[in-house]
Image: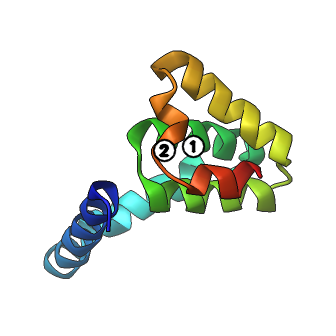
Amino acid sequence: MNIYASIYVTELMSLELISKQQPEVISALYRLKNTVFKEGALSVKEKELIAVALTALLKCDECLAVHAQKAVEAGATKDELRESLLVAMYLAGPSTVIWTDRIDEIIG
């Protein structure tokens, strides 16, 4: 397991613990997510493509996979996924797209 995967597992375990100890906090977090990712001035697809770029910058492997899948479900193409990653790469440098093999799975 790479460092990012172990961080994600730790975060996931922390979220589980928080959800048991303070379920209202996690409920509020999910209400916010559901509100933010509704169709609005930006489409769900555009919001998910933004999320793909941001999760690449944050180097969250599982987050990247989830948002890439949601972008595809919202109608995003491989070309759109690739371009969202190129924007992230331009802003933060090549390390944005070379830290995980999942990038190749998403745009390949």
Q: Residue, x 44% and y 63% (percent of image)?
A: 30
- Going by the numbered disc 2, the residue's amino acid type is Thr
**Residue 51: mark in rendering:** 1
Q: Residue 26 lies in what quarter of the image?
A: bottom left
Residue 15 drawn above or below residue 40 = below
In 3D space, how far apart are the residues under numbered discs 1 and 2 (Cα atoms)? 6 Å
Q: Residues within 10 Å of mark 1 (few under 14, many from 20)?
A: many
Q: Position of residue 79 (x, y in %)?
A: 84, 39
Residue projecting furthest to the left: 21
Residue 20 drawn above or below residue 37 = below
Q: Dots 1 and 2: beta carbons under 8 Å?
A: yes
The answer to whether 63 appears left or right of 77 in the picture is: left
Q: Residue 25 lies in what quarter of the image?
A: bottom left
**Residue 55: mark in rendering:** 2
Q: Position of residue 73 (x, y in %)?
A: 79, 62
Q: Position of residue 75 (x, y in %)?
A: 86, 53
